[in-house]
């Protein structure tokens, strides 16, 4: 199968003035991308839990931005916000699911209630937006669903295993969705950032499970590793996002940052080597044809 190539100026759909619906637009990537889209002349329905957190967007961009209060775990609020944005601008070209947070804790430490709450936002909130938007995108005959995943949707780390698990589920959901809605002329892209110097580690984007003493040393070493890791500049990312949404044939997956590909390549090489080494055992488990 031929590898998908990045869009060039001759292969891009250069339709001006896209209309975006962005969740989690008050800080981090969501804020940066909303502002960048508005700066290039697009229109944005920007959503956040607290409407006041979006006041600067309205002040700077006026009628090109529609700010909406949205808790993605509130299904009726999601339906209302998506419908209101579509009615206000007349269409939605890009639906970008960015709202989410992380849960820090070992698999033993985190409570079932905390894990359910994490999935309510990261998975069920995303699903609510997608299901609310799809009938509208299908009716208008075009649209691009962009899900903000992570390199951690491909490779898991300790201490944030539950967050990683939401991103693995996120990846599967969008991969299936891409095949299901392609016949309607709709696109799906998973954006997979590496480590960036955003506000994702703030109290608003991070929950910490009660710790057990038995993991204290491991936790200390791991958190120090995270603190000293190289982080990318989030202000350098809008051009990559725009390249994907402006492409005539956008990629299903797009890494942000230079560290992801080497990391994932090494991880998958190790996985393949293990599968190959155990292939005789696996093949024997096939049994005889029925």
Image (cartoon, rainbow, N blue to C red):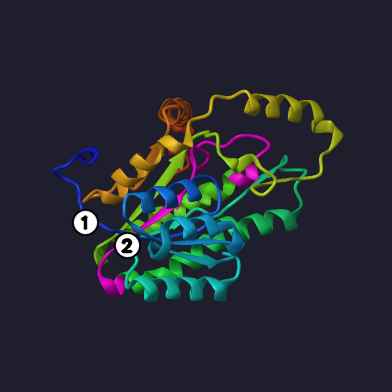
The reply to whether dot 2 and dot 1 touch (C-beta < 8 Å) is: yes
Is any part of residue 49 visible from this angle?
no
Structural crowding at the residue carrying mark 1, measured as other residues with C-alpha within 10 Å and reported as few (<14), some (14–19) or many (≥20)? few
State the residue in front, 206 or 156.
Answer: 206
State the residue in front, 83 or 131.
Answer: 83
Label number found at residue 15: 1
Distance Cα–Cα, label 2 vs label 1: 10 Å
State the residue in front, 193 or 114.
Answer: 193
Q: With respect to residue 186, does 209 lie above or below?
A: above
Magenta span contains residue 143 = yes
Q: Position of residue 176 (x, y in %)?
A: 39, 57
Report which residue position mark 2 lands on. Answer: 93
Q: Residue placed farthest to the front in the image?
A: 59
Residue 94 picture quarter: bottom left
Q: Residue placed farthest to the left in the image?
A: 10
Q: Position of residue 88 (x, y in %)?
A: 39, 74
Left or right: where does residue 269 sit relative to residue 156?
Answer: left
Query: Residue at the spot x=45%, y=55% of the render?
Result: 60
Left or right: where does residue 47 sit relative to residue 141?
Answer: right
Magenta span contains residue 121 = no
* Magenta-drawn segment: 138-163
Q: With respect to residue 31, does 276 lie above or below?
A: above
């Amino acid at each position: 199968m031929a590898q998908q190539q990045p869009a060039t100026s001759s292969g891009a759909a250069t339709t001006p003035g896209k209309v975006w619906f962005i969740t989690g637009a008050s800080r981090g990537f969501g804020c940066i991308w909303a502002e960048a889209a508005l700066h290039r002349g697009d229109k944005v329905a920007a959503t956040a839990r607290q409407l006041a957190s979006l006041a600067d967007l309205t002040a700077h961009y006026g009628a090109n931005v529609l700010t909406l209060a949205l808790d993605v775990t509130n299904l009726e609020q999601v339906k209302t916000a998506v419908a209101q944005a579509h009615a206000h601008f007349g269409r939605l070209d890009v639906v970008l699911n960015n709202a989410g947070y992380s849960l820090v804790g070992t698999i033993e430490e985190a409570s079932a209630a905390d894990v359910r709450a994490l999935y309510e936002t990261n998975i069920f909130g995303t699903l609510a937006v997608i299901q609310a938007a799809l009938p509208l995108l299908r009716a208008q005959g075009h649209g691009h669903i962009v899900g903000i995943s992570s390199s951690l949707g491909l490779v898991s780390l300790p201490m944030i295993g539950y967050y990683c698990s939401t991103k693995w589920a996120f990846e599967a959901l969008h991969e299936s969705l891409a095949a299901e809605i392609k016949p309607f002329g709709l696109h799906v892209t998973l954006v997979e950032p590496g480590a960036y110097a955003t506000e994702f580690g703030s109290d608003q984007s991070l929950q910490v499970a009660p710790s057990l003493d038995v993991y204290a040393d491991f936790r200390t070493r791991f958190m120090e590793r995270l603190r000293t890791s190289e982080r990318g500049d989030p202000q350098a990312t809008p051009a990559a996002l725009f390249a994907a949404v402006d492409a005539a044939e956008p990629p299903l997956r797009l890494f942000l940052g230079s560290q992801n590909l080497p990391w994932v390549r090494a991880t998958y090489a190790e996985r393949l080597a293990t599968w190959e080494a155990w292939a005789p055992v696996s093949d024997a488990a096939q049994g005889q044809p029925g």
